[in-house]
Image: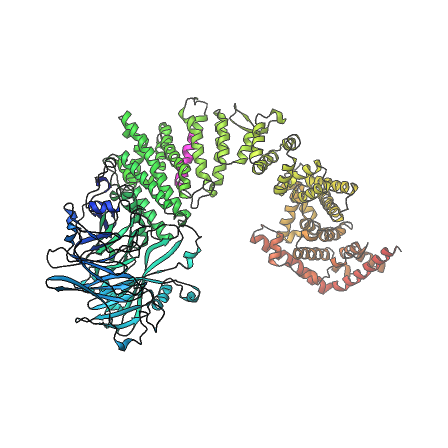
Amino acid sequence: MMSPVRDASVASMDVDDAGGVAPKPDTVFARSKEMTVALYSHLPEEVRLALRNADFARDSYSGEVDTTTNHSLVATWQTCYVWQHTQALTGAPTCYILPCPVDEDQNAPLHALVPYAGAREPGLILLSPLGEIRFWDSVSHGLAGGAHYNKAALDLQPGESATSLARADPQTYIAGTSEGRLFRLALTSAGGRPHLAARPFSRPRALTRLLSFWPTAAEPTAPGPVAAIALQGRDVWALGSQRAQQWALGTDGWEELTREHDLAALVGPALLQSTGKEESAEEIDLDLELLDLAVERPNPFGSLSSSLSMSQSLAHDPTGKRSTRLDVLVSYAPFGDEEEEEEGAGRPRRMYAVAQVLVGIDSLEVEKVVHVPYQSTFGAGEAPMHPKLQLLDGGALFVVQFGDAITICSRDNDYKDRITLKSASDRTLGVGAGPAHILVLSASTMLRATLEPTAVVGYAGAPELVRSVLAQAILYGAHPANPLRFAFPPAVEPRALASGAEALSAAVLAGEPELMMGAGGDLTSQLAVRADRLGFLIGFINENGVLGKLSSASRIKLAEDAEKLHAASALWAAYDALLTSNSRAGESVLAAAIDGFASQIGEAGSPDPVRAFFRSHVAELHRLPAFVEAEARRNPAVLADANDVVLTIYESALRYREANGALYGLSPDDLPSPEPWTSSDELLNALHPLWEATRRRATSSASSAEDPLAAHVPRLAVILLGAASGRPQRAGLMKGVSADAYTALKALGREDAAFALAERHLDFPGLAALCLAHFDPGHGDNKGVAAFPLSANPHLDRIREYMSRWREPFGDALFSWCIEHGELRVLFALEREEGYASDVDAFFGRCGERYESVRWVHELGRGRWAAAAGCLLDGAGKEGEVSGRQLMLSLGKLASIANQQAGAVADENTLAAFNDGLDLIDTQRWVLDQLEESAGSSAVRGRHPLDRQAELLARGAASRLHGSAAQARVFRMLVRRMLRGEALNVEELADVLSLRDNKSEDDAGSYATALRLLYAAGDDVPEARKQAAVEAVWRRAYLRDDWYDLQNTAGVSDAEIAARFDRTALARTLDSLLADDMALAHAIVPPASALRLPEPDVLAGRFAGADAETLTGLRQDAEGEATRLQQVILDCGLEEAFVRAREAAYARGLTGAAGL
């Protein structure tokens, strides 16, 4: 079981910064669900002094924590310090000081403690890199200076050095060298005196053909130094830079090499596969290095995390044939995503992993690769340290010692954690592993990390680790006596970072007890501590350089939590002051609103609901304004108090946002996504009624200048507009509120506040209105009439300033206001008198389509005739009134002629368009005159309502539509529009001309007029619709005459028959089309072709906006026309009549063209 650790928080560290009192043992420096790190003991005074000014980057130091002997040691190149670390728990331990074997390069020696049975002090072996060995049978010799020791030496070759030393059993130790050789160090007793002998491993001749781990004359390539030695019973595993060997130790002094494997070739592909890069193996240089080795024999029933270990072991080795696992610590060069970072400090230099290798009878297999949460980085200045691997909990946990950190990784799940030293002058010297704890010896202290196996097995994942790191940093990181630094694991995953950070922020906001250690008992102190901890949280994220990994939504969430906490602190401070000065504060608007909130969430009846809200429900602060507004609505007398509550919440939150937005990577110029909490519908729905009530009360005649509501108007306007500006879909609300706000502020004599408000929100239309609209304080609103001349405008200097600051956006708003309010005189005065001609030009270039009806005036004033003609032509097409369209076409025609007279190339197309447009208007007026004439005196304008006039005109002029209800409705509608002075388009006028009766001989020419208008329209009418309209005109032309009567020739002379035929609409239309030239020959449609009916989509396009019933009726009426025409063709020989009339018209047309 874990050793009990006193629940010592930062508050109970018992450290006096001024006096320099050290923390007591068991003081907790870090605590998570899985691990607690506490002070185990202080270093002996002798060790502390020796390490006080150590330069670990320059000088060589080594250390060891031996849990077998319960002793620890620290060695420099000159001196070795040994002490019993368990003795340090109860007082100052005895420190044994022994001299180290001399090394020319001043490297610290290798070391091994020699355990004995009972309470006897252990012995000590020191091995220098040069191979000199010193052995003391008891470290107690150090009390007398340690001058008496047993001396031996390794038989090293020139240039060879000792690189590793490990204990096989109390009497046997194994040393490795830089040339890949192994030595056995054996302790014996001769004459009652201890003796140490060293000799190299023997190599049976039968195995000399194997690829040796060591160089010989036949093998000139050295495999590299022995990096690590691991032992399992009588088996020795030796790790080189690329390969591993297994040796069997004989009890009678022999050694036998039993196997050898190229581990690098096995681990490299597995490492790539674990990162998903196996397909790119040929392109990646891992620069793999084998660092350390540990051996475990899986025993699931003996592990503290037995349930998980057993299932894993049985799954991997159901037969039990593979009984050994090698855990190999490796380092490699970064690749893939890690290489994408720029060169420089912080860029990963080496990364680390533990490869779990299952040892079979005759093969090895990489079972799993566990990545270690540590990276050495360029520019970090880590002390030189060969990483070391140890096993905890039977191999269920890997403990890796680095120079500035210890990492703990689970073999069976994703649990990973780190113990990192804070000071750059501190470093780890040794790690000792117990059943469920590790002792960490550093240059400043000795720590004990106690693991909770159940929590490790139930590890919740990376988000929980992030939350744990943040919580520990908040609770323990700020204390100067804590030797640990808290940091996120390397390459922390963005989702995990966001989830963990948001979870901790929410916990602080909710005031969870575990995060409130050190906070005072009163609510003011608690709120302050919570606010500080949220500030520490975002500061910690920034210091670790991971802010960029958080999405904008996550950063906004963290900022919102801090904003709410600061707003809550300000609101509580105001309420607490009220409690101090007013015994009836409990009846305040805030108290009543919180009561309403408590009832809604089922917490009514709390003895102190206000404190309960601030302790546990600050996250719900955005809901409070709705309850405040409800109180103000219920009791209008408390409106000012309600405003104070809402203003305190908003203004405190916004102040924090403005001051600290950069910490969260949020810019006030960026539109937040998602929307900020201060712009939620819930808040806007509470704010808007408060604003409206305050504005009305403050600007009423009964309100006095001293009314506090008057001071609330600009403040409420600021926060309401700020809230609405965060909601693009609330643009309408913002526009309405801003206009009301400016009016109210002017009425209250706060014009500067109105300008400031518009400037704050860059409301350029609002600024334009404030600068131009004349305001009558007596009436309390804007009259929309600009001061003129410009010199009479008191805001002329502001106009100039704003044009200088925001030339384009403000200029557009300014000129738009002039146009929309009919103040063209102001627009042109700004252009001429203030020198904004180029700005007005640019404005019309950007916004010309919106203001085409005005732009031509500007162009004419600048003498740009062609541009003015173009504007007038476009504007005429959009002008709905006949008179307005005629004026624009006439002016446009004159501008076009003026352009030609100025020497410009004539634009015949533009001139023709003006003429066609004017012809269309003349035709419409002519048709209307004829309709009125045909209706007689009963339809005189002014004597009847417009609808009655249209009905009378339609009845008198289109009697043949009696059986075509849909066409009759269309005809009446078009007549009504003409009576109103609306301009018809070509298709509409063609319908009027062809649907009327056209009884007179002169009226028969209406069909040719309609056809000419349709073909003169060009591309203004889609081709399919134009063709359908032409065919409809011809159908009606064919049906205008009674062909049955024309066939009745009895008693009629040939001349009369010819005259009657020439008076038909068919003959008159053909003659008219072909009279001058043959250009309109393509407009002729034979009777059979006129039977075609318009497609449904063509009909829907022509009568856009018509309902389905109307479209169906129009289709049916067209079918009726086609049916009647078909009958005439069959009964009366209409096709032959058409051919005869066309030939005659061609002949007359050719005669006319020849001038005969």
Q: Position of residue 141 (x, y in %)?
A: 15, 53
Q: Is residue 945 magenta?
A: no
Q: Position of residue 755 (x, y in %)?
A: 51, 30
Relative placement, left or right, of 467 versus 863 is left
Give the prevailing secondary structure in the magenta stretch: helix
Q: Is residue 682 magenta?
A: yes
Does the rendering let one see residue 939? no
In the rendered image, the quadrant that contains the C terminus is bottom right
Q: Nearer the viewer, residue 64 or 95?
A: 95
Residue furthest right in the image: 1156
Residue furthest bottom in the image: 206
Does the rendering let one see residue 62? yes
Q: Nearer the viewer, residue 765 or 955?
A: 765
Please, which colouring scheme is shown?
Answer: rainbow
Q: Position of residue 296 (x, y in %)?
A: 23, 65
Relative placement, left or right, of 1058 versus 409 is right
Relative placement, left or right, of 150 versus 714 is left
Quarter residue 243 falls in: bottom left
In the rendered image, the quadrant that contains the N terminus is bottom left
Q: Nearer the viewer, residue 731 or 939?
A: 731
Image vertical order of residue 648 relative to residue 221, above or below: above
Q: Which residues are magenta?
A: 678-695
Q: Position of residue 69 (x, y in %)?
A: 16, 56
* Labels in figure, total: 0
Quarter residue 196 falls in: bottom left
Image vertical order of residue 102 relative to residue 524, above or below: below
